[in-house]
Image (cartoon, helix red, strand yellow):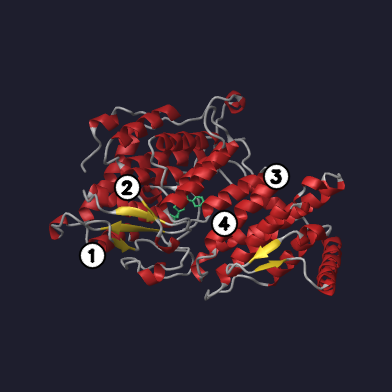
């Protein structure tokens, strides 16, 4: 790939969101959309709108709704583009690799060409995902390194090297029919990188990090979807750039309409989140998009992806549809239970820890107060379906832990379980009919009364302890409340 093509240059300068949409629309018509160009353009815009925000000095501008979209000059983009292309072409002697398809040796060399320039600091900060970050700050996050390798191979005119994505890791596939795999980046903290190594069946089997062999294997258009999905509109922990969020949302709808999100559940989840924040007129509601994300995982990935369910659960929780939230979370652990938990799976562990030990307890508390307003007939603490999904949620977590090298549950899980159990009304606990996997039936209402009496005593004892603790903690601000604000998407100030 040489310099920018004339047709690409004509879109500059980019002065508004629509100019970026037009540039991407044109690139996506091509069967080799220019990954390097698009990553640099998005990185420049994200940097101006979030990291180096031009603080408008004239007072009148700050309170108008006039957008602050920057003017992106061709010269800025071309300089960065040439820098990356030159760096890649100068570092790889193609004459040594006459094959049409990439080899493992070449993949390691290209990974090294990216890796050697990286500064060793702050790898899990925001806004480190684009080639702009690589070219101006020598910093890339885990995804950014893998993407840079794939963009480099496009420049070297290999069309067999593609991005392979799980829910918390990225690597590449290559070779005649994408049969080869290779690590090209690091994962998590304190793990030696395994760059150059293949991802073997033993590493993949029952591993959430490698999705048990069901990762998202991208083509060039899905690689564009990955950089758009990776846009981070956050200015800081509490405020997002409205312009950057709108650009991401419009680009995701462009990719959606072209069919490039149909096999990418997380990109659909990201789009659902954006639609919750700012609904696009004439587009489906967020729930429909989350359902499409789940359907995509079922159809294309043997229902092995977990995030589609936690996207949906989080959405229902935020909108106080507690019954639907419990159903989604039960289906999330139904997906995760087939994996064996290991030390590199912390991200999904944290997701479930928050659901089990924070969101569900908070939900049960709210519902308890709702009872006070005598609408308890519809409340979840009287609903057998909710109780069944609550039990399924925990059953999935326990099955996930079974045969795992690393334990999942600890005392806090048990305490919260007892605490939440107690919030369900005893009558509803009798209505549950437990059918084990081998079809054996047993009703949850225990045959002997003293057993349920004993169960009640444990629960009452736990409640007494909880009440004592709450009184003791009265003065202390609840961290979760703070982080609730942190997760809030306040409008651009
Ligand atoms: F569980 C839900 F509530 C979630 N909310 N946000 C979630 N994200 C946000 C976006 N995200 C992603 N969104 C699109 N594509 C990818 S590829 C990938 C793995 C890695 F970064 F490449 F290593 C992560 C990821 C990770 C999961 S899950």
Q: CA distance from mark 3 to mark 2?
A: 38 Å
Quadrant for residue 261, please give it: top left
**Label 3 vs 2, first from the N-terminus:** 2
Q: Is residue 291 above or below residue 5?
A: below
Outermost front residue: 440
Disc number placed over residue 320 in the picture, else none: 3
Instruction: Between residue 138 and residue 101, name the one nearer to us.
Output: 101
Disc 1, SS: helix
Mark 3, residues whose alpha carbon is within 10 Å: few (<14), some, or many (≥20)? some
User: Residue 33 placed where, x, y %?
Assistant: 30, 40
Residue at (28% x, 46% y) in the render: 83
Residue for badge 1: 105
Residue for badge 2: 219
**Label 3 vs 4, first from the N-terminus:** 3
* Side of 251 relative to 490 (left or right): left
Q: Quadrant of the N terminus?
A: top left
User: Residue 106 placed where, x, y %?
Assistant: 23, 61
Q: CA distance from mark 1 to mark 4?
A: 39 Å
Disc 2, SS: loop
Residue at (16% x, 55% y) in the render: 94
């Amino acid at each position: 790939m040489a310099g920018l093509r004339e047709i690409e240059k004509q879109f500059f300068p980019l002065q508004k969101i629509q100019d970026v949409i037009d540039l991407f629309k044109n690139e996506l018509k091509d069967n080799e959309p220019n990954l390097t160009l698009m990553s640099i353009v998005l990185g420049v815009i994200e940097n101006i709108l979030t990291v180096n925000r031009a603080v408008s000095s004239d007072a009148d501008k700050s309170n108008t709704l006039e957008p602050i979209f920057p003017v992106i000059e061709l010269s800025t983009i071309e300089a960065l583009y040439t820098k990356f292309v030159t760096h890649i072409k100068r570092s790889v002697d193609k004459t040594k690799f006459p094959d049409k398809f990439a080899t493992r040796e070449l993949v390691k060399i290209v990974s090294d060409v990216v890796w050697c320039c990286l500064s060793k600091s702050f790898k899990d900060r925001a806004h480190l995902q684009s080639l702009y970050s690589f070219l101006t700050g020598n910093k890339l996050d885990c995804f950014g390194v893998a993407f840079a390798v794939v963009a480099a191979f496009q420049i070297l005119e290999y069309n067999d090297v593609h991005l392979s994505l799980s829910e918390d890791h990225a690597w590449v596939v290559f070779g005649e029919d994408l049969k080869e795999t290779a690590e090209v980046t690091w994962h998590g903290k304190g793990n030696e990188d395994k760059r150059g190594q293949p991802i073997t069946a033993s590493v993949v089997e029952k591993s959430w990090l490698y999705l048990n062999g069901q990762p998202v294997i991208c083509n060039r258009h899905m690689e564009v979807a990955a950089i758009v999905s990776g846009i981070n509109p956050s200015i800081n922990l509490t405020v997002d750039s409205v312009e950057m969020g709108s650009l991401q949302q419009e680009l995701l709808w462009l990719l959606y309409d072209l069919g490039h999100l149909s096999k990418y559940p997380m990109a659909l989840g990201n789009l659902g989140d954006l639609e919750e924040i700012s609904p696009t007129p004439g587009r489906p509601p967020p729930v429909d998009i989350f359902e499409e994300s789940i359907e995509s995982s079922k159809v294309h990935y043997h229902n092995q992806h977990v995030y589609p369910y936690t996207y949906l659960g989080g959405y229902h929780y935020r909108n106080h549809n507690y019954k639907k939230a419990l159903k989604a979370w039960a289906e999330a652990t139904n997906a995760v239970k087939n994996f064996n938990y290991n030390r590199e799976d912390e991200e999904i562990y944290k997701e479930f820890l928050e659901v089990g030990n924070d969101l569900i307890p908070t939900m049960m508390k709210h519902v308890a107060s709702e009872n006070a307003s005598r609408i308890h007939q519809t409340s979840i603490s009287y609903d057998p379906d909710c109780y069944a999904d609550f039990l399924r949620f925990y059953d999935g977590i326990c099955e996930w832990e079974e045969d795992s090298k690393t334990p999942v549950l600890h005392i806090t899980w048990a305490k919260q379980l007892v605490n939440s159990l107690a919030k369900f009304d005893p009558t509803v606990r009798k209505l549950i009919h437990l059918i084990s996997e081998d079809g054996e039936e047993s009703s949850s209402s225990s045959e002997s009364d003293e057993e349920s009496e004993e169960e009640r005593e444990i629960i009452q004892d736990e409640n007494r302890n909880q009440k004592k603790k709450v009184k003791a903690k009265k003065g202390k601000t609840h961290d979760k409340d703070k982080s609730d604000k942190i997760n809030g998407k306040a409008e651009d100030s």
